[in-house]
Structure formats: structure tokens, C-alpha cells
Image (tube, rainbow, N blue to C red):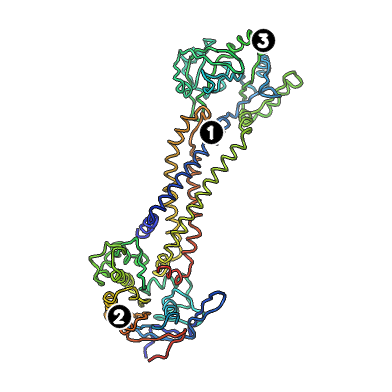
Amino acid sequence: MAEPFVKIRNLSKSYWRGGRQVPVLAGIDIDVAEGEFLALMGPSGSGKSTLLNLMAGIDNADTGTIEIGGVEITSLTEAELTAWRSDNVGFIFQFYNLVPVLTALENVELPLVLQGLSRKERKERAAFFLGLVNLSERTDHYPGQLSGGEQQRVAIARAMVTDPLLLVADEPTGDLDRRSAEEVLELMEKLNREFKKVIVMVTHDPKSAERAHVIRHLEKGYLNAAP
Amino acid sequence: MLLLKILFRNAFRHKLRTILTILGMTIAILAFGILRTVVDAWYAGVEASQANRLITRNAISLTFSLPISYAEKIRQTEGVEKVSWGNWFGAYYKEEKNFFANMAVDPKSHLEIVDELILDPAEKSEYFKDRRGAIAGRKLAERFGWKIGDIITLKGTIYPGDWDFVLKGIYMGRDETVDESIFLFHWDYFNERMKVQNPMEADQAGFYIIEIERPEMAAAVSGRIDAIFKNSLAETLTETERAFQLSFVSMTEAIMMAIQLVSVVVIAIIMAVSANTMAMSVRERLAEYATMRTLGFGAGTVFLLIFGESAVITFTGALAGVALTFPAAGLFRSELGQFFPIFIVKATTIWLDLGAALVVSLVSAVVPAFRAATAPINSALRRAV
């Protein structure tokens, strides 16, 4: 049997709130296979976003290990983790998190600044990925001039532009109307199907979760048994 | 380029707030520059002092005079090259508000020693020939519209009466630090009138100006001169020209200290304003910096973006302040030239302006930058909502 792309073992995380330690995740074990599209569901406060942040390397676990693409990210230093994120993870946020003072093209180009490409190469590559999300006509528009769905598609292009191994999406359709949400989900399915990207998506919405290959539920920091 | 674009666009994202901060910085730097120039102007006489010149005056006080016979004894003192003498005259032109420095001096020896006053040879010759002849600095002549040949009547205060002079020359300073607003005339003319008007005041010099061979001899020569007149009816006090000028300035040192303190307080106030601007801006954009860190940009990039933004705002204001300092100083000079004859914005003041701007930009940005660069990414991202 092939090694899973994401391998999480005995992962625990707690936060300090008002002088009290609040456990968020307790002894999580989970595997995500190559090419898999995983949806994490659960009520608010169940720890699904925390699990996603830990997988993406933007939060630190208390105990346990996370191995992604053969790299144990829980043992990396902060600087190593920053570099690893730049090369291996694409982020899709609920509220898009585009830089308002940059155009759509420049937002997509931004992660490439760290890749050591020439300006021409960066522009060409960013334009290609904007085309992939059907926004070639909106390259010079600023986020404030785009609809929510369009902004999320720009965010997806930005997440894809460095060709990461893993795409993490935190409620990517949470701020969108149904039609825009469908477009975004179709796009994510396409990225998984055609570009073989591993996608881990946190969602409240069962209809969105249906697009994933695997759905896992979190409840009070515990992961329900795999189906 | 992309990061520079973010930096500049961020600086002007909240236009009103940024413009008000820039305006505050401009006013602060302008005030700082002018106040520093006032202090420099106050000390201009001290700065312009020559190291090889001594001043001898009555040991009791400057208001007491010395016999003119001292000149020869001073000249014979070891280490003395040249001697001149003079009296502070303290007259005004037409009205009391038209006050300026005016002195009775021995023309030839005075111009030999005070060689920073540049006079046309022909004018100098005319000045020497006519006992009622006088010379005025360029700025003073411009102030009252005097021309060579004009009869100038000064009204005496210490030595009462109307005193008529013929303007024989208009001197220029060797450089911009030389006071061009002094009026000088023949000591002999003054003394002759004193002999008639007030014989007790005749043949008396208010001060002696002495040129010595080498600056390092100042202490020894001063000691020798004062030793000659020790236990006489008019004991002397000899000091360097710089010390003599400083003795005037030191009377107002508290005021100068207060002005310097105000100039620093002005910078401290703008530092607080600028720090507030940066704190508000960065707090509003905490999620954007967190997003950039998520994409792989390190804390160093976040620091640079925030320090750069702070520098753009503060230096825009500071450069405008520096640019405005020159016309403001010109206005100051034209309106208050009689009190501050040397009112020059020094290069040191500009460097201090820019140094102050650098300090303001660094101090304003340090706390917000540290916060944006080190806040946990996941909690900073939640601020996007």
C-alpha cells in the first residue's frame, strides 16, 4: 500500500483562554492519499480550522506529528516552515484575503516574487493561471472592483500559481452566493482532477462537502471514525 | 517592484490620515529648523570669532573704560602683533526702533585686524581720509537705502546729541558668517567731541582688539597684558574673542536652552502623532500581513514594508519642511534682521532635520512592525472579517 501524502499521528492542540487551557484537538490520526479531495466538517469550535492550519504550517501543534509529502513539518523551524509553505501549500480563505492595493494579476504574481523568477516569467505565469480561472479579462482590476466569486477565483489562481503539492481551503464558499459557490467548487474539482492537487477543505455546507472524495467529521476535537 | 508598490500604495491608502500626518511632520521639521537656526544665529558672533584675536576690557565691567595710553603698552607686550581700540557708541538712526551695532574705532588698525570686512580700496582710502567718514555693512546700507556720500545723522544715547557722518564705504563680509549690519566710524572724531562735550570721557577706549602671533599663545599673552595693568586704577581683563562673545550669549543661555528644548519637544509630539498613524494603519492591515506571511514572506519583509511606509510618510513631510525652511528663514531674516544679522540655515540643521525624520520614522514603525511580523498567523488572519 502506498504511503499517504498527508500523515498525521496523535495530534493535539489546546489554547489558553482566560487563564484556562482549552483542548481543541485531541489525539488526531488521519491520512490523506495522493490526489485525494478531503472535506472536514463539524460544528463551530470542533477544531476543523485548527486542524487545517496545522496541516498548512501556520500553527504549531502541542504534541504529535504531521508529515506532508515526506516532510515532517512539525520538526521544522519557523524560517524553514515559512519557506516550506511558500513552495508546497496554496491557501484559499473564506474572505479571499487578496491584497487590495494590487490588481488581480499582481495578486496572483505575488507568491512568485519568492520563487526567483524574472518579471516576465512571473507575469506570464500569473496571466496563465488567471486564464485558468476564466478571469483573463479582469487582470487590471483591483479586488474592490471584482465580485466575491471573482475574488475567490483570483485567490484560487494565487494558490495555484506556485504549483503547490497541497491546497488548503477554509470555508472557500462561506461568503459566496450559491451560483458563485458552485463555480468555485467546480474549479476546485477541476484542480484536483486535472492537476492532481491534494485538497483539504473545511466547510459547514454539506452540499459543498459532497464534491470531496472523503468527508471526515470533527466533534469537540475528536475525529469520527473513517467510513 | 511589487513590494515597493504595496509599500507606496499602503502609505497613501488612508489619504486624509496620511496627508494630515505629512502636514504635521512638515510643520514640525519647519519649526525645528527655524528654532535651531535661531539658536545658531544667537551664537553666530561666537562662531565667527577668530582664534588669534584677544579682547581687553576693564576688569570691573564692560561699562567702564580704559585709558587710551594702554594701547602702546599692549603693543609692546611679547606675542602681540597688532592693536586696535574702540568704543561701543549705542546710537540709533532717526527713531529708536532703528537700532543697530555702531562703534567708534581706529579705522586703519581696526580693518587690519578685523580683516573679514572687505572694503573696496578706493572706499577704504576715502574712509581713512575723512575724520567724519564712516562705513556700513551691506545689509545695513540696504536696510536704510544708504549710498556712498550720504550724510547720516545718528542720535546718541550713551553720548547724547546728533552725530553727523559721511558714508565713505559699504563693506561686505568675507563669508556669510560675517555680520554685515555694523556701522563704524573714526574714534578720533568721537574723542575730539568728547574732549569738548565731556572731558572725563575723552582719551578713553571701551575695549582693545589685539591680534596675537599664534592662537596657542592666547592664554600667555592675556596673562602678560593683565599683569602689566595689575594694581593700576583701571585693571584689565583680557580674554579670547570667543570667550568675550560667549560672555554676552551666556546671559541669555536659559532662553536658548528653552528654545532648544522646545525644538526637541516639537519632534517628540510629531513622533507620537506618526506612531499613532502607523499603529492604526498596521492594525487595520494585520490580516494582509498575515496573508503575506502565509504565502511565504518572512518577518523581515513585513518589517521592511512597515518601516518603508513609515519612512515614505515621515520623509515626505520632512523634505517639504526642509524645503520650506529656506523661504521661512528668508522671511525671518527680512523681518527680524536687526536682531539676527546672521540668520543662515546651516547644513548641520538640515542633517539634524533628516536625522529627526529618521528617528521619527523608525520609532513610529517599530512596535506595529514587531506586532505584524510576530503575531500568530491564524489569529491575525481572523482580523480580515
Residue B116 x %, y %: 52, 25
Mark 1 element type: helix
State the residue position of label 2.
Answer: A192
Q: Chain of mark 3?
A: B
Pointer 1 chain = B
Residue B278 image position (x, y, % from top left): 46, 57
In this image, B295 relative to B170: left or right? left
Quarter in which the N terminus of chain A is drawn:
bottom left
Residue B69 in sight: yes
Q: Is residue B221 visible?
A: no
Q: Are marks 2 and 1 in contact (CB under 8 Å)?
A: no
User: Relative to the observer, which residue lies in front, B378 or B47?
Assistant: B378
Number of on-image labels? 3
Where's residue B235, x and y in %?
Answer: 72, 21
Answer few, some or many: residues within 10 Å of disc 3's Cα (few below 14, many 20 plus, some between 14 and 19). few
Check the image and report above or below for B129 versus B244.
above
What secondary structure is found at the residue carrying circle 2? Answer: helix
| Mark toward the viewer: 2 or 3 | 3
Mark 2: few, some, or many residues within 10 Å (few <14, many ≥20)?
some
Q: As drawn, is B103 to the left or to the right of B5?
A: right
Name which quarter of the figure residue B44 lies in.
top right
The vertical placement of B72 against A177, above or below, is above
Per the model, the C-alpha gap separating discs 1 and 3 is: 38 Å
Look at mark 3 in the image and give the residue it sits on: B199
Q: Nearer the viewer, residue A84 or A62?
A: A62
| Of callouts 1 and 3, the N-terminal one | 1
Asked if both marks, 2 and 3, belong to the same chain, the answer given is: no
Q: Name the residue carrying label 1.
A: B41
